[in-house]
Structure formats: C-alpha cells, structure tokens
Amino acid sequence: MYGLTKTTFKAQALEHLRNVQASKRPLVILERGKPVLKVIPYAEDMQSELMKFRGLLLRYDEPTAPVGLDDWQLLQ
C-alpha cells in the first residue's frame, strides 16, 4: 500500500489507477496528512481474496482480560 496527497493524485490520476491495477496494491489518498480515500484493485471473486487471510488471525477467548500484567512490573 502506498499513499499520496489529493493534489498529487489529481495531477496523474490515470497513471496511479493503472499502477493500482497492475501491482494489485491499494492506494491511500491523503488530505493534510490524514487518509481520506482508499483505492483498491477490483476482485471478481472476493471469497478467494479473503481466503488469503484464513488462519492468520488469533482467537481471544477473553478479549477484555488484561494481557501481560507481569510485564508491567518491569517498568516500575
């Protein structure tokens, strides 16, 4: 993923869109340094695209439970 300002995108929009299409990498458009738009390559079969992420996420049985309390003792 790469980012650029609205002004830079506007000046060479077609070139940037072709780059997203060819590289299959998303493009983030920034305004005053903050992301405002994201251009992503089109995928006909979104299910196969999502399958790339299968098995990468961890499961947390208690997502609100404190993590690493013993580690905080090292900072004192």
Image (cartoon, rainbow, N blue to C red):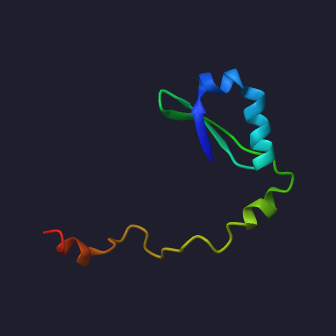
Q: Position of residue 73 (x, y in %)?
A: 18, 74
**Percent from the top left, x then y, of residue 51?**
74, 67
In the picture as drawn, the residue positioned furthest to the left comes out as 76
Q: Is residue 43 above or below residue 56?
A: above
Q: Residue at 48% across / 74% down in the picture?
A: 60
Q: Where the C terminus falls, by quadrant?
A: bottom left
Q: Residue at x 68, y 71 (%)?
A: 54
Report the residue at 76% width, 31% height from top.
15
Q: Nearer the viewer, residue 44 or 34?
A: 34
Q: Residue at left 47%, top 76%?
A: 61
Q: Is residue 38 above or below residue 57?
A: above
Can you tell which quarter of the image residue 66 is in?
A: bottom left
The x, y position of residue 53, in whole percent, is 67, 66
Count the marks.
Answer: 0
Question: Residue 23 location, x and y as percent?
Answer: 76, 48
Q: Residue furthest right?
A: 44
From the viewer's perspective, tell me whether residue 48 is left or right of residue 5: right
- Which is nearer the eye, 23 or 38? 23
Vertical arrangement, residue 47 with respect to residue 55, above or below: above
